[in-house]
Amino acid sequence: MSNNSLETRLATCLLLMRLGIGLVFFMWTLDKFVNPDHAVRVFSHFYMIPFLTENGAYIVGALQALVVGAFLAGYLKTWSYGAVFLLHAVSTLTPMANYLNPWDKVNLLFFAAWPMLAAAWTLWWLRDYDTLFSLDARTPADAATA
């Protein structure tokens, strides 16, 4: 297998990871506009932020839309991929009580956050290889000479 083939395969896998993670974040962002009351309840229950209003949910959604747009476009990868990883890390770690009782209600679904967190970290770590359909499509060789 040639090195070019390996880089092409890696870039394809990273693009698919970016699209998969981006889809989840897009839906979470859209939820803040379609169902802002849900965002208010989530922020109150999981993040201990009881003062978020529906208008606040719209603002959070707009800021999140900017990050998700940059992420999906492969733009400002160090920043946007890092932001997505950190946002997902917070949302993965805050419901810790749900992990301690996985068989209660729908708590088992919370475990799906861990593979996505690993994928978000991997995408950030290998961001220079994520070159397909990326606005910041520098190759690793370009990054080394910059």
Image (cartoon, helix red, strand yellow):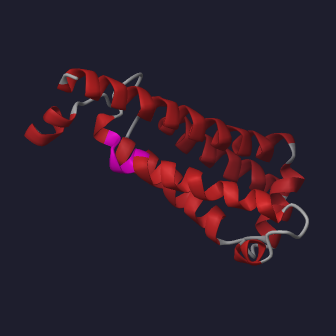
Q: Could you say where residue 29 lies in the image, as x and y percent from the top left?
A: 70, 43
Looking at the rendered image, the quarter that the C terminus falls into is top left
Query: Which residue reaches farthest left?
Result: 145
The answer to whether 125 is drawn above or below residue 43 in the figure is above
Prevailing SS of the magenta stretch = helix
- Identify the image quadrant of residue 9: top left
Marker count (numbered) = 0
Residue closest to the eye, 115 or 135: 115
Over which residues does the magenta segment extend?
Answer: 123-127
From the viewer's perspective, is 145 left or right of 9? Answer: left
Residue visible at 67% across and 72% down in the picture: 94
From the viewer's perspective, is 36 left or right of 9? Answer: right
Residue 135 shows in this picture: no
Looking at the rendered image, the quarter that the N terminus falls into is top left
Residue visible at 30% across and 35% down in the picture: 129
The answer to whether 31 is drawn above or below residue 19 in the figure is below
From the viewer's perspective, is 112 left or right of 15? Answer: right
Q: Is residue 3 magenta?
A: no
Q: Is residue 126 magenta?
A: yes
Q: Could you say where residue 7 lies in the image, as x and y percent from the top left?
A: 27, 28
